Amino acid sequence: MSMNGQGRPTRPEAAPASDAATLTGNAGLVIEEALIFELDSPGAVGVDLPPVPATAQHLGGVKPRRSIGLPQLSEPTVVRHYTRLSQKNMAIDSAFYPLGSCTMKHNPRLNEKMARLPGFADVHPLQPVSTAQGSLDLVAELARWLNTLTGMPAVALSPGAGAHGEMCGMMAIRAAIEHREGKDSRRRRVLVPESAHGTNPATAAAIGFTVDPIPADATGRVDVAALEAKLGDDVAAIMLTNPNTCGLFERDIVHIAEMVHAAGGFFYCDGANFNAIVGRVRPADLGVDAMHINLHKTFSTPHGGGGPGAGPVVLSEALAPFAPRPFVVRDASGVRIVEHEGEAGSTGLSFGRMKAFHGQMGMFVRALTYMLSHGADGLWQVASDSVLNANYVLASLKDVMSAPFEGPCMHEALFDDRFLKGTGVSTLDFAKAMIDEGYHPMTMYFPLVVHGAMLIEPTETESKATLDGFVDTMRRLAQKAKAGEADWFAAAPRHTPRRRLDETLAARRPVLRWRPPETRAQAAE
Amino acid sequence: MRYLPLTEADRRAMLATIGAPSVDALFRDVPQSARLTGPIAGLPAHKGELEVERIVGRMAARSVPVSSVPSFLGAGVYKHHVPASVDHLIQRGEFLTSYTPYQPEVSQGTLQVLFEFQTQVALLTGMEVANASMYDGSTACAEAVMMANRATRRIRAVLSGGLHPHYREVNETNARFVGFTLDARPADVDGTEDLAALVDDLTSCVVVQNPSVFGHVRDYSDLAQACHAKGALLVVVVTEVVSLGLLTPPGDMGADIVVAEGQGLGVGLNFGGPHVGLFATREKFVRQMPGRLCGETVDADGRRGFVLTLSTREQHIRREKATSNICTNSGLCALAFSIHLSLLGERGLMDLAALNHATAVGLAGRLAAVKGVAVLNRGFFNEFTVRLPKPAAGVVEDLASRGILAGVPASRLWPADPSVADLLLVCATETTTASDVDAFVEALTEVLA
């Protein structure tokens, strides 16, 4: 069996052909669909454009191109193509999707409707500010909510996603250190727990810090003694996720923040798990200096199959002056956007620009709509129910599965693969069997500090009935694994548009694009 | 609360199963000092749909949508007509509410879309391979420079004065923190800068934009050769993706990396985001590429299928040794881009591009006839620069008060450069009507009189 470093199989075992084969390869509602390039019908069009006026070209000597190679299709063909493709996806709308650390909660359609209002969607980022007051008002209002919910005085809105937000926060920290200690400051070491998301060390390393891992203690939290031993005048910051990736609240968080601050460092909090505490705990009260907020997690902007996200970063008083441009300021004349140093409202200390224009406006509208719908009372309930749901799953499964740490957990329940020991069933096999039962798998093999990790995040938008059905299925799967039915698991999934895919082949001989059949033949020669 | 399914009875039953006296007890690991005792102060209580719609709708009503007035705005973000089926299809829940396709058996829809998207981007740019998208054009540009630094093991990049200033600034931020050198050229107003002489043995890449931020269109084949002669890479930035339907693609000019802002197809303006970054390169650089990649493979039954691949470059595997810290792409925007491009097809995109160009040529002729106005471009696509007899920012404000969004004053992008104060960037697309042009010319004539 081909495996990666975490013991995750990457190549499927040979499997017997399905006995439910059809003549076409179609399976009822799930219909095989060719690549869009294979549907090419020369002469067909999917748009009707007015005739091009006969004018001389002004291309300054650049030649017009003769061809591109795109297929030609009518609108019905295109609509059917993408509709059929959509039917090969599992999604929150159709299934329970307890993907730990990703907060796959219900995406209200009101948010979509509001984001499409022309006063937001059809506004150009460089039109005169006097003609974009509503858009800027919305940005300022979102900032007010984020500041209030976190207790932090400032927020940088431009980062395009969580990892981009991490970069923003860490750049602000480096700018603050250089401002305080000079460009040659030796504070370059960043402490990152071994359980951290991969983006944390990648971010720190990308912008010139060195990464120093901190081990976890037996309770799944930061080993405070090990952390203390690593502090010194070369430490720039700690990057800590709280609640952490094991689904646990770092009990010593306030003490950790004080120690880091006393050593002259900053506290970057990865806010990926903010959903557990939103409206109930303010990060400012934990000693946080910077924290990104994944609007696509906590505030339910849709994940869209992998983005776009948005990662605003709240900043403490100490870091606020270094925030990236642009940012909005509200004054007597209305809301303005500060785009350059030297403009009224600028600090002279901003670390610069991270992205063209003003941030993920479409996501801001959705997030604010979500906040207004919930209100302070609803957000309190969001955190409460998300934590309740996770603890319910933990309590309902810990006797048949194996939980590495004592509860209560926060908004996600972590299991390891000890309960599968000796069964021949891997975490991956178990997850693939869940797919056949109609559940999206939990996050697997993360966090890395737990062997064969299974991280389950139900979110607050799942009913007790859904959780009961899930728990029942998981219990039966666990019993089936322990009953020695490893082959049954190894052959899963069977009821999906595709069965297990050969990842090893994909990486060994990368085919990253379609090519016309004749060039494929040439390439093979 | 309409989004929360648990009832009070459910909560009591669940607490009993857990063996906890209250939900508060589940938060016992949070230090007492940081636990709020009730809903946070200073924010309103929950609201129904109708109320929320009214509040948000009132805000939206205070901005002027570009479609409601004659608009000539461009400078990196372009208004194009998006077919109705695009927005309909991307709102299918299976696309909208799914996650990154880490479970390929139940994500073949998203994965096939990405594979098709990568192919479309490679074809458009004239390159061999493309990734599954980046946040936007500016961040794609910054990733391109860092990739060139990795590929050449050099740390000095030359940025054209025709590069959008926001893109330059994003690179400047990276250069400061990542630790490399930029030679950012002054604003190239007339489109005649010669960068070949700046390329030496220490240069990792030269970054040019085509059409440039001032609208100039150039052939960069000679510059590509000059770069390659010194072992440097040529990065070509395209902020108006529709131009690729008319112009010789950067790949044919010898570009090593092409990055583009794809917003013009399918995505819309969105006040600047979300947009979608396109990233394409040569096959030999695939393993240096940032971002997600989708690849073709087979399943256990031998059928064609798709997976995310070459993830050994990425942060969740490589952690501090990853090629980039990027975790997400711009999936749904890439889908919108891809659907729009599928509807256009070969003929449609080329016609659309020709229509844009012809409309802009017509507008340039009309503006050049206004007293005191000069068009600076010899070659352009759908955007060009005019010199006005007085500062452009004031003219734009005057025209805005007359209900015309006249374009982007160069001073909005180069506030510290007085030499560009009289310049206005003007764009026309297929959405520009003859009456829009008439209104613009008439109002401009009045304002300048």
Image (tube, helix red, strand yellow):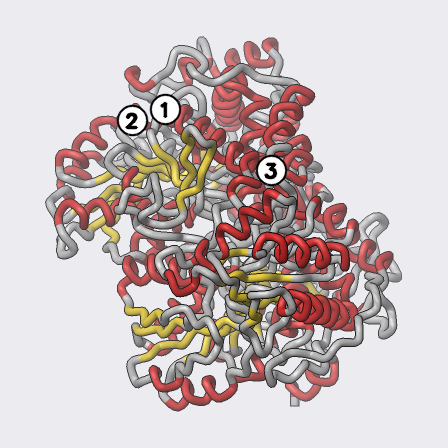
Label 2 sits on a secondary structure element that is helix
Q: Which residue is mark 3?
A: B63
Which quadrant: the C terminus of chain B?
bottom right
Residue A266 can be seen, yes or no:
yes
Q: Which residue is mark 1?
A: A282
Side of A201 relative to A310 (left or right)? left
Judge whether A405 appears above or below B26 on screen.
Answer: below
Q: Nearer the viewer, residue B57 or B230?
A: B57
Mark 2 residue type: Leu
Label 1 sits on a secondary structure element that is loop
Which image quadrant is residue A477 in?
Answer: top right
Q: Nearer the viewer, mark 3 or mark 1?
A: 3
Q: Position of residue A446 (x, y in %)?
A: 44, 45
| Chain designation of label 2 | A
Side of A39 relative to B444 (left or right)? right
Q: Nearer the viewer, residue A328 or A404?
A: A328
Distance between the alpha carbons at the discs numbered 3 and 1? 33 Å
